[in-house]
Image (cartoon, rainbow, N blue to C red):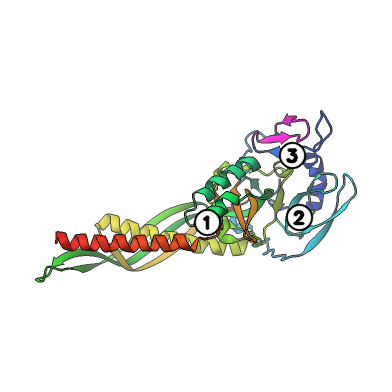
Amino acid sequence: MSEFDTNLDAQTTDTLEETDKKCPSCGGVMDFDPATGGLSCPYCGHTEEIQTREGNEAAEELALEDADKVENCDWGVAKKTVICKACGAESVYDALEISAVCPFCGSNQVMEAADQNTMAPGGVVPFQISDKQASDLFKNWIRHKWFCPKMAKESAKAKNFKGIYLPFWTFDALTKSQYSGEYGKDKVLKKRDGKTEVKTTWYSVRGEHEQFFDDELICATTNHNQSMIRGVEPFNTADNKVYKPEYVAGFAAERYAVGIKDAWQMAKQSIKFKLHNSIQKRIISEYHADRVRNLQINSTFSKLTYKYLLLPVWISSYKYKEKVYQFMVNGQTGKVSGKTPISIPKIIITVVAVVLILILIGMLGQYIG
């Protein structure tokens, strides 16, 4: 597949046989099966492997400097009509969707491009968690939520799970940084009244730091709760496959709404934050310091590469007291993220218990002193 796909309508025609692959046993449309990593017929159980080219198993790292042809693609809530080539039925979809299932005949579809400058995915991390496993993981997750009301835990039943591939950018970067600041060493002094105080002596520090960042992940969808998505991270992006439409057969998939230029700026900010933490930890370790202040960092970035990946997520929800709570399950690792109702009595009991423990610790400290 080329780096840029300027004619996804042609791609749709080319991939129709792969996404609408008919079962040789019963003629049903085959879907991707997380259990086998291949195609499976939901009607008779027939399975087939997905054929890949030898030596071309993972998405290629592409030079970021060559991505200037791609503009930011924020299509908002635009809609499009797709005609199913299997049965002729018309369906309306969000413009960002890459794939879907025809509600009339069950045919899998890879849709036409919403924008001729849209980049095709370079790779996909296939689903490894089934909807049944996602349901079990959700039940275990909510059971361990302490502040969630007992009634909510007992009554929470997830609605049908929707498997969706969300768009992400990954960036690789070699960073070289020059830094300066101060590190402090604490000394505990005992006063005449028996109390203690901490005196910090500060020293100047400067140096150089080199660090490589591999697959800095930036979510490229604006249609879903970002904190919930971050809650199901990380993904093992190294375990990706070169994009083939068979991997999305039977699942929904979304194109990016955050273009590569904006995504790289977001990645740079994330990398700078991590550099600050890394350098701070390095100073504390090297100088046996207790604290760092006034840290100034000047960084350069080189060997910049990127990938456009589709990553798997199960989405569902449950209802408690007429309110709907949505959650997600990482389709690769099984990590769960979402919102739960909160029990006010449990919060009050916890706060009172913590306060009592702190009081007892203080009284014990005075008694020992």
Residue marked by disc 2: 6
Which one is closest to the eye, mark 2 or mark 1?
1
Seen in the image, is 238 located left or right of residue 288? right
> SS at mark 3?
strand
* Classed neighbour count for the residue bearing mark 2: other residues with Cα under 10 Å, few (<14), some (14–19), many (≥20): some
Residue at the far left: name it.
192
Seen in the image, is 204 located left or right of residue 210? left
Point out residue 293 in the picture as x, y percentages from the top left corner: 32, 68
Residue marked by disc 1: 149
> SS at mark 1?
loop
Between the C-alphas of marks 2 and 1, the distance is 52 Å
> SS at mark 2?
loop
Where, by quadrant of the figure, is residue 193 drawn? bottom left
The residue type indicated by label 3 comes to Asp
**Does 202 lie within the magenta span?**
no
Viewer-proximal residue among 224 and 123:
224
Point out residue 116 in the picture as x, y percentages from the top left corner: 77, 59
Q: Which mark is residue 171?
A: none
Which of the marked residues, 3 or 1, is nearer the chain's N terminus? 3
Point out residue 361 in the picture as x, y percentages from the top left corner: 25, 60
Q: Is residue 322 above or below residue 47?
A: below
Residue marked by disc 3: 31
Between the C-alphas of marks 3 and 2, the distance is 27 Å
